[in-house]
Amino acid sequence: MSRVLVGVKRVIDYAVKVRVKPDHSGVVTDGVKHSMNPFCEIAVEEAVKLKEKKLFKEVVAVSCGPAQATETIRTALAMGCDRGIHVEVTGKDYESLGPLQVSKIFAALAKKEEASLVILGKQAIDDDCNQTGQMTAALLDWPQGTFASEVEIEGDKVKVVREIDGGLETIKINMPAVVTADLRLNTPRYATLPNIMKAKKKKIANMKPADLGVDIVSRLEVLRVDEPPTRLAGVKVETVDDLVAKLKESGTI
Amino acid sequence: RNLTLLESQSFAVNMFKGQINPSQVFPFPSVLNEEQTQFLQELVPPISKFFEEVNDPMKNDSLEKVEDSTMEGLKEMGAFGLQVPTDLGGVGLTNTQYARLVEIVGKHDLGVGITLGAHQSIGFKGILLFGNSAQKEKYLPKLASGETLAAFCLTEPSSGSDAASIRTTATLSPCGKHYLLNGGKIWISNGGLAEIFTVFAKMPIKDEKTGEMKDKITAFIVERSFGGVTHGPPEQKMGIKASNTAEVYFDNVPVPVENVLGEVGGGFKVAMSILNNGRFGMAAALSGTMKGVISQAVDHAANRVQFGSKIHTYGVIQEKLARMAMLQYVTESMAYMISGNMDSGSKDYHIEAAISKIFASEAAWEVADECIQVMGGMGFMKGSGVERVMRDLRIFRIFEGTNDILRLFVALNGFQDAGKHLKSLQKAMKNPLGNAGLLAGEVTKRVRRRAGLSTGLTLQGSIHPELSYSGDLAVNAIEHFGVTIENMLFKHGKNILHEQFVLKRVADSAIDLYAMIVVLSRASRSLSQGHASAQHEKILCETWCVEANDRIMKNVRDLKSNSTTQIFKNIKAISAAMVENGGTVSPHPLGF
């Protein structure tokens, strides 16, 4: 029961106003501020906390992407992860990289690193897929505790309180397991300057998906990306009868 | 014997001689290596986040102190030892890296900025610059972690600008092992919080040449734990309320001789070096402050509708926004040019640093003021946060060397160097044959200048061709400036020291000239690098240069004209009458 694997994704910063590329093939990423996906920050925080409680010996941060992904790994290291793994995916491969390929990579690494626990953010704020955690668990045939708002290690099992539509659900699963972090799991710590300096000395290993025997060819093709339709102005009416008439007019009723 | 004229590398020093030394200003310095840039890029987001999410400037302002939890967070963050070497527990930042972080603090909370700055930019900077290894090892680690705070103790009730007149005394004990410190300091930032004080006191020193005893200043590292150190209650101020300002009293404080900082009797130089060394930080912080308020002004102008249109479509508002942008652009360019020069090892930056402090503090005040004006009534309301920034900014024109004193400093330093230049020429005149080449060059230059001809000074090759018109304006301004300096020296000689009306106008021109050069350098670099914003920077630069040139030429004309001499006489007379009358002089129009 020694190692936790945490996945961290580099996404467009939440505060940025996203714009669609003129050719509608995607969104503008050049020169745009990027940072660690907020749910991944929560995942890192949880992993580091578990290590600080001495429940695990090592936390390994993993990111898949081009060279800039190492910036995100370094943030994870500054928050307390021990070492990083950068799985290099660039160009067109990176543009088409999605949950299925990433979960294949994570599954391979979880086995290679003999991880007892894989913690991921529940979803990324760019694609909102909410699939990688679930697929990773399925590929590994491991139990999964998704949308976690509380995680407790009890021996060789994990107790997870899950946020579901009806309220909260508590489950107990065997390790090794996959957990995905939800908003209320914790409040991520600030990376301090001394920790950023210490992180400079931590190692980041570099590898390609092929080194893990993973095929990252995408089975999906993005046809077109559009902005949401601009919200039309509303119309004020004086009486209920007017309202009914207008609704009939617009074909709504 | 041939004489060569002493060459300083400082652009400002040379411009007073009507010369262009481009080495420190072209190209715009780029001093961070890849590792330093990468490291800095990692530091910016957590610091920004902390100031956006944790620090509450309004709370700090109303409590008149930095919230305890924020102070703790800043200490954990490592913000108290940014320039302390890493082996002594600090972050080990270069001046340029420090400037970038201080910019973030300036954008969000100047009260916190002064708390941090009083601690590390001046409070213990003396130990970094002049401390021996024992002093550094003893004090820096705890100062870097924020376990102990530092304060810079120079000002006294009767000694502000006239720092050399301080009265705090240090007397060597009979056993010779420690000094006894006696005196009182006022308006000390962090005075009520600090454990470690850099204190300046005077003591009688035997003059080596004359054998006379003379009072000289020595700098000391004083620990509150030495005993005899007390402080007064926090001063109630107009702004930077979160920063603690207090009187500090020294009553027979025993300071071990090992705690002398720098040389015995060399304290004045220590004080000036410390202030000089930290000045670029102010320009950096204020460029951040300006960026912050400009965003608010633009946001308001882009959304507020009056008379049927968004107000940013109106010329009056456009002029305000554009001028705010130019002032911020100049300040930012000065800050990073100077920090870049310092990081490259330049020791000759004191005039530029003083210029940047004057410019930044006045520009920021103007920008904040105009921001409130753009926002109208909203700007005046506490909730918008701009009135707090305005109140915080007022002190920046006063402390760390009032802008008035610094203007005299800039002008007099410039005159001094130009004067030395002329003196060297005078010496050369006594041996003309031996110095024929030198003299011939100088004579030709003067003849051409007085005939209004160019002396071949040029910025070609230094600036981007698209900026050549503005470059020509700058060269023309430097030529005229050089002539004016010489004329003033010929007219007044050593008495130039007392001609403050002249000195102020000379300083204003020097500031405008340096500002022209820094934006030419910065915009040239952007154009050469093909930045997306390069064309925008080009128009900022060109607009600035045209108007700065006009101001410089006006000053040059005024200093030649007889009507200005009369104005100076009038000013003197008006002021004398006011002092005699204890206020305004003229009787009321109603007669009572």
Image: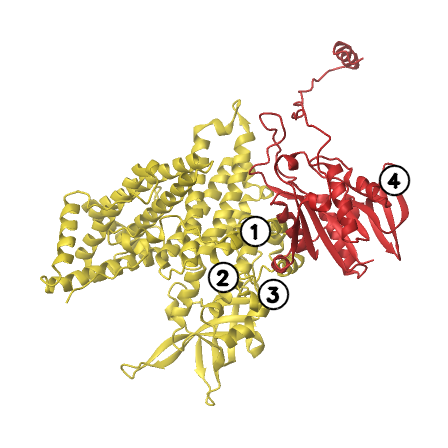
Chain colours: A red, B yellow
Disc 3: CA contacts within 10 A as few (<14), some (14-19) or many (>=20): many
Q: To which residue does mark 2 refer?
A: B121
Q: Amino acid at mark 2?
A: Ser
Amino acid found under the numbered disc labelled 3: Ser
Can marks 4 and 3 be said to lie on one chain? no
* Number of the label disc, if any, that sits on residue A167: 4
Image location of residue A15, percent across then percent down: 63, 39
| Labels 2, 1: one chain | yes
Q: CA distance from mark 4 to mark 3?
A: 45 Å
Q: Which residue does the numbered mark 3 point to in the structure image?
A: B145
Query: In terms of depth relative to the viewer, which is nearer, A156 or B422?
Result: A156
The vertical placement of A6 against B470, above or below, is below
Say which amino acid is labelled 4. Answer: Gly
Question: Residue, x 51% and y 55% (percent of image)?
Answer: B97
**Which-is-in-front pick, marks 1 and 4?**
4
Write down the chain letter for disc 4: A
* Residue drawn at (60%, 52%) of the image: B47
- Mark 2 in CB contact with mark 4 (< 8 angstroms): no
Q: Amino acid at mark 1?
A: Asp
* Earlier sequence position, callout 3 versus callout 2: 2
Q: Tell me where residue A90 sits by quadrant.
A: top right
Relative to A127, residue B520 above or below: below
Circle 4 crowding by C-alpha within 10 Å: few under 14, some 14–19, many from 20? few
From the viewer's perspective, tell me whether residue B279 is left or right of residue B108. Answer: left
Can I make out residue B194 in this image? no
Same subunit, tags 1 and 4: no
Q: Is residue B100 left or right of residue B588?
A: right
The image shows residue B422 at horizontal and vertical percentages of 19, 59
Instruction: Report, in whole angstroms, how far the alpha carbon at label 3 lies from the one at label 2.
Output: 15 Å
Mark 1 — residue? Answer: B109
